[in-house]
Image: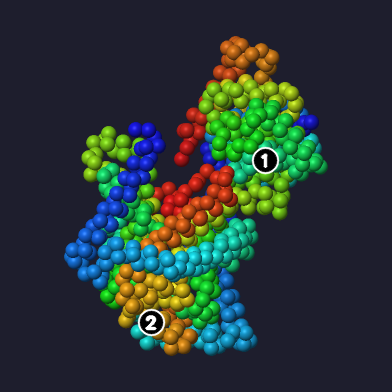
Amino acid sequence: MTSMTTVAPGKSSSLSAKGGRRAGRLVIGVLKYVAPLAILALLWQSLSWLGVLNPKTVPSFFSVVAAVVDLVAEGEIFRHLIVTIYRAELGLALGVVLGVGLGLAMARLRSVYHVSYPLVALTYTLPKTALIPIVFLWLGVGDASSVFVVFIGAFVPIVITTFHGAESVQENLVWSARSMGASSQRVLWTVIFPAALPQILNGVRIAQAFSIVIVISAEMVASYVGVGRFIFVFGEAGNYDYMFAAISIVIAAAFVLDRLFLLLKGRLLRWAETEGASR
Amino acid sequence: MSSAMSLVVRRLGGLLPILAVIVIWETVSRLGLVSPVLLPPFTVVMERFVSLTASGEILGALWVTTYRSFLGLIVAAVVGMVVGLAMARFSWARWFFNPIVAVGFPLPTITLLPAFTIWFGTGDQSKIWLVALTCFFPIAVSTFEGARAMNRQLVWSAQSMGSRGPSLFLRVILPASVPFVFSGIRVALPLAVIVTFVAEMVGGGGGLGYLLIYGYRFLQTPTVLAALIAVLVFGVILDQLLLWSRRLLLPWDVGEQTARG
Amino acid sequence: MSAAIEINNVEKAFPVKDGNSVVALHDVSLSVPAGEFVSIIGPSGCGKSTLLYIIAGFSSFDSGSVSVNGKPVTGPGTDRGIVFQEYALFPWLTVLGNAMYGLRHRDLSKQEQREIAQQHIKDIGLEGFEHRYPKELSGGMKQRVAIARTLACDPDILLLDEPFGALDSQTREVMQDQLLRIWQETGKTVVMVTHDVGEAVFCSQRLVVMHARPGRVKSEVRVDIDRDRPREQVMVSEEFNEIRNDVWLSVREEVALTARTRR
């Protein structure tokens, strides 16, 4: 009986040697990946040394690094970071829960769709940061207004992505479930929701990035705490190296958050067929 | 009902919820259920809107904000397309830009606003460059992934018909990549708008964002709300612009969607 | 103009995730004289498309030799035209634009290019559709444009990878008739990969049946039926059905084999 002929690669040696080699390869891989960033940093620093960059407006790379170390050691930035992240995630969570709810409702019930869709479509084109002044007028300066704007900012796109995701669930899946005796409710939660999940999570990921932007923007406009304000204050005072240091730390935090989200998405969607769009 | 009639009815039907909201707004405000300081009646807001339009303030601000975001978007599109294509074609470009894009894509570029204001002043430049930087990443990513996933049978067919190197690039790879540039722009558009507004609110220098903050700081609620209506108009305009340019540049493309997706 | 193809002892393996590799083609040899219409048929996984892509120059191979008219194959070329199952038309070009594409590499004026392309479009029956975009055409029409485009380059060899697989059976029959007519009129060498036994027997002078896993040549069958008769007569004739049944059973054997050994 003919069988699949496989050809094995070269023989491998002892287990520990293999492990050591793999770890070594990992380190080299990481270094190779990060190298371009290092090159840019080097370029930056060289330009500073050469005096091409005005040290008053563009601090040198090293001075920013020093400022970062100082900020981290001092710790105050983390207090602000926590406030910012708290506001962003709370608004996001509210937006996700209510947004998914409305999105699914719109997909299932025609009446809900007809009432909500025009309003949602209208507000979709509105950049949510433009709501910051009016929300501040209504709710004053503080957590509530930031969270509210984030909530709106997340709510609208998530409603739309959920709705589209639920709408585009293949009829066959729904029919199969129905013919196996599932009730409308059951179909909604066990078929439509999981099937729409990839699209929903894509919407959530985008909303997540937006929520950070919205909170920081709100804080720059008017706030007493939060990294937006923190960065702004340094800028006003002319402490540009500390300003850049704060910016870097925020960027690092945002990057970490995004990666965490990707991990979460990967776990939730273990079953999904890979269809590109890993971003 | 004829199909034309039913279309009109459907469009009007879509407006009903919006009209309902407006009516509720007017009533609630007039009755004093909500303080008119916080929520001036719709009619008062429209009055302010009209006077601001007449004085040219709204149109001026609308123009400034539109052209800042559009310009920034175009810069990002050109650079993003070049980088995206380079990444698809050259492994060194991929190596170089991969970490940069991975870091830059989720980066809240708004944090760089104070820096950009210092470097480029409070005028147009700081807004345009910030928008360009923000939108560069999604467009580059979209172009790269699109070019990479390109149907290799298109390339093979072209090669079988004699295309090589630069000819292959210009005649096949480039046109096949343009739809992906557009889908990147579609993602980048709301970002461009958001960034422009915040830059104007925090960094000054005119535009609709500045108008909003002005109203806020002087507690002129009607102005703020009137400006918001202008913002809605702005959003619709930008959306349509994108749709038209797509129709113009890609008449052959199957996947036509509004910026709303 | 046509050319002969010589394939000798070709081996091709694909690397797989965990460092191993899968042998796609093992010791494949095939000789196609100039002007012959030969079909390659077999179960999925027998490497027939891979073999075609090797002849076309898109895929490399590990050992053996592949030559066209005595010259070894090193890459894609205008002497070997390709038609894919999914048409591979350039969506941004009109029908005329697609048909004219390959002509730019010949020494012809724009006017001459247009005339040649238009003639080919007329030959496949799409006169009047020159300025339509692919998205406006049906599957059968798209495939005809793909064929016209390839023929406009006047290749010596025509390579077809399951060209009618995406079409419904009526359209498929029409296309087979057209393909046969084109071959009879131009005398080019044609190599067609298909999984449809009836199609292979109807169109080709010779069939090559392949084993799967790894891909090897199982048998070759000569098809000597009178093709000057109309399709109706050919399809019901005894000779046609005898050959068709034999080949079908042979292929079915292979299909059953692969089903049993599938991991």
Left/right of residue B119 with respect to residue B159 in the rendered view: left
Q: Residue at x 26, y 53 (%)?
A: B20
Q: Is residue C35 visible?
A: yes
Report whether A29 appears left or right of A195: right
- What residue is disc 1 on? C97
Residue A266, visible in the rendered structure: no
- Residue located at (72% from left, 35% from top): C117
In depth, the one of B80 and C207 nearer the eye is B80
User: Label 1 amino acid?
Assistant: Gly
Most foreground residue, C89 or A120:
A120
| Front residue (pair B155, A161) | A161
Q: Position of residue A72 (x, y in %)?
A: 40, 83
Residue C257, horizontal then vertical, whole percent:
51, 31
The kind of residue tagged 2 is Phe
User: How many residues crowd around disc 2 within 10 Å: few (fewer than 14), some, or many (20 or more)?
Assistant: many
**Circle 2 or circle 1, nearest the eye:** 1
Q: Label 2, on which residue?
A: A230
Most foreground residue, B93 or C200:
B93
Q: In x, y percent, where is residue B186?
A: 48, 56
Residue at 46 percent of width and 88 percent of height: A238
Task: Point out residue B76 in the picture as x, y percentages from the top left corner.
Answer: 55, 64
Q: Is residue A216 above or below residue C163?
A: below
User: Could you tell me which secondary element the residue under label 1 belongs to?
Assistant: helix
Q: State the CA–CA distance, disc 2 to disc 1.
A: 59 Å
